[in-house]
Amino acid sequence: MNITRRTTLAGMVAAAAAAIAGPSFAAGGLIAIITPSHDNPFFKAEAVGAEAKAKELGYETLVLVHDDDANKQSQLVDTAIARGAKAIILDNAGSEASIAAVQKAKDAGIPSFLIDREINATGIAVSQIVSNNYQGAQLGAEEFVKLMGEKGNYVELLGREADLNAGIRSKGYHDVIDEYPDLKMVAQQSANWSQTEGYSKMETILQANPDIQGVICGNDTMAMGAIAALHAAGRKDVIVVGFDGSNDVRDSILSGGIKATVMQPAYAQAQLAVTQADEFIKTGKAPAEEKQLMDCVLITADNAGKLETFALKD
């Protein structure tokens, strides 16, 4: 796919300065950390983890939020370029829409290290570190099937359609669940990773399908919205399974609400990205593989007590 490369004035200045100075592998400097809204605890954990590791390694940090808006993300990348960032840690705003922003940073001599979400291109970012969403979804689906007793009507709440993770998780779910003919999906709607939309979509779906026994969700935020709507309707019998491993869902599991989730190592991913950025800044050495997968972990009542900020305590 051909992509028109546009370099901002700030990017041209940064690139020219880099060319004059030659390659510099000195430690220190600024690392920009750009994620979706911190209202979602998953993205906040990424930002906190990346910032902590960057400061530990002697960097200043610039923590920014793009709110899943590709135009805003592009402006924030311009800001990182203008501030002379040594690297960008990015949980992007769309697999296609973010390619130009990552390319812009590269053209300005600033390497990008992606976390959580991939882009539909290789050779532009230095690394793309993501959870093994397919493996995690299969774990969640297997537990969902067991909790449902291999039968019954269920609903699926999908994430944002522009996010590759939403499709990968849904496929992982269905590659397991569809093997059980007595499990019937009666509704499938996107709630865009949102708790508010999870609540409203669940409310509407429940009115049309009062006989549902289960809900499987693309993330924990939607699961929290779904279970709130179910409880408001007096339906505490419906099985809800999420995906992310948030503290909110941990607490719900421990109190007998949501039955299971799948933990993504958000904090560890972000810290690994910063470690790789530090190595690249100091030596110019990129990781052996651009795309890297980190396995997910099933969380149930058995191990939820060990879950803290998207990591399992010893």
Image (tube, rainbow, N blue to C red):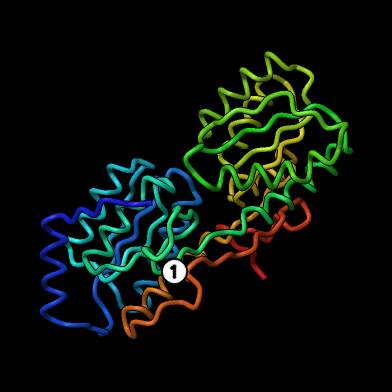
- Residue under the point 49% across and 49% down: 41
- Residue under the point 84% across and 41% down: 179
**Residue at far front of view:** 2
On the image, the x and y values in percent for residue 145 come to 82, 42
- Which of the two residues, 286 or 39, is positioned nearer the viewer here? 286
Identify whether 177 is placed above or below 297: above
**Residue behind mark 1:** 273
- Residue under the point 22% across and 82% down: 23
Query: How many labels were placed on the picture?
Result: 1
Identify whether 254 is placed above or below 54: above
Name the quarter where the C terminus is drawn.
bottom right
On the image, the x and y values in percent for residue 60 come to 27, 70
On the image, the x and y values in percent for residue 162 come to 47, 40
- Which of the two residues, 34 or 225, is positioned nearer the viewer here? 34
Element class at badge 1: helix
Q: Quadrant of residue 273?
A: bottom left
Around disc 1, counting alpha carbons within 10 Å, would you say few (fewer than 14), some (14 to 19), or many (20 or more)? many
Q: Is residue 157 left or right of residue 192?
A: right
Q: Quadrant of residue 204?
A: top right
Q: Is residue 80 left or right of residue 157?
A: left
Identify whether 233 is placed above or below 169: above
- Which of the two residues, 239 or 12, is positioned nearer the viewer here? 12
Q: Amino acid at mark 1?
A: Ala
On the image, the x and y values in percent for residue 140 come to 72, 48
- Residue under the point 21% across and 65% down: 108
